[in-house]
Every structure is written in C-alpha cells, then in structure tokens.
Image (cartoon, helix red, strand yellow):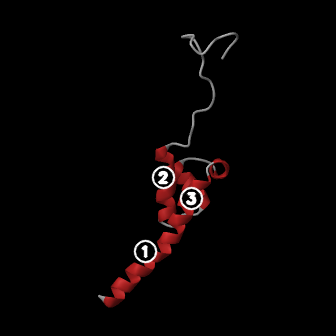
Amino acid sequence: PKGNQHKDDPKYCKCGRPVKLTPDTVNKLLEAYAVGAKDRQACAYAEISKQTLYNWIKKTPELLDRIEDMNENLPLKAKANFARAIHS
C-alpha cells in the first residue's frame, strides 16, 4: 500500500508481480515433460524461466514429483507402443 492506505480503502494498491504458478502454467510444464522435454524446453513452452521453475520446486516439492512421474512414464509408454507394434 502507498502511504497510510488500509486494505479496506477503495484506493488500496495490490502491488507486486502477478503469480505465474497457475494451473495453466503447471499443465503446460507437465505437457512438455510428458513428451520428453528438458527443463529449458518445458520452461520455454510454459513461458517461465528455469529459475522460476526451480524456485517453485523448492517451495512445492510435489511439483517435482509430478515432473518426475511424467519423465518416467514416457519411456514406459514408448516401450509399450514398441511391443504392440512388434506383436501386431
């Protein structure tokens, strides 16, 4: 707030940077990791910096778990598709 403004004041300023950790941004990250993207590629797709990603992971470890799940599932899906192609 500027000066002596109180949060109930209609002129109260909610200053600061907008939050980037939105469900849409997380979904973009997970989409990128699901197709094998590396951190730099996933961040570019989600329109965030790598440092922002690392800060989020530090604050919300469950995000790292979701990213690791995406990275681990890709090889399994590829192997399953390969096996289906061989046995078809």
Label 1, secondary structure: give it: helix
- Out of 31 and 60, give the one closest to the viewer: 60
What x and y, as percent, mark residue 57? 63, 52
Q: Amino acid at mark 3?
A: Gln
- Please tell me how crowded label 2 is: few (under 14), some (14-19), or many (20+) other residues with Cα within 10 Å: some
Q: Nearer the viewer, mark 1 or mark 3?
A: 1
Q: Which label number is shown at residue 41?
A: 3
What residue did someone put label 1 on?
A: 77
What x and y, as percent, mark residue 16? 63, 28
Residue contact at pointers 1 and 2, CB within 8 angstroms: no
Identify the residue shown where x is 43% and y is 74%.
77
What residue did someone put label 2 on?
A: 28
- Alpha-carbon span between mark 1 and mark 2: 19 Å
Q: Amino acid at mark 2?
A: Lys
Q: Is tag 1's residue or tag 2's residue first in the polypeptide sequence?
A: 2
Label 2, secondary structure: give it: helix
Identify the residue shown where x is 55% and y is 57%.
42
- Alpha-carbon span between mark 3 and mark 2: 11 Å
Q: Nearer the viewer, mark 1 or mark 2?
A: 1
- Left or right position of 61 against 73: right
Identify the residue shown where x is 65% and y is 11%.
5
Q: Is tag 3's residue or tag 2's residue first in the polypeptide sequence?
A: 2
Residue contact at pointers 3 and 2, CB within 8 angstroms: no
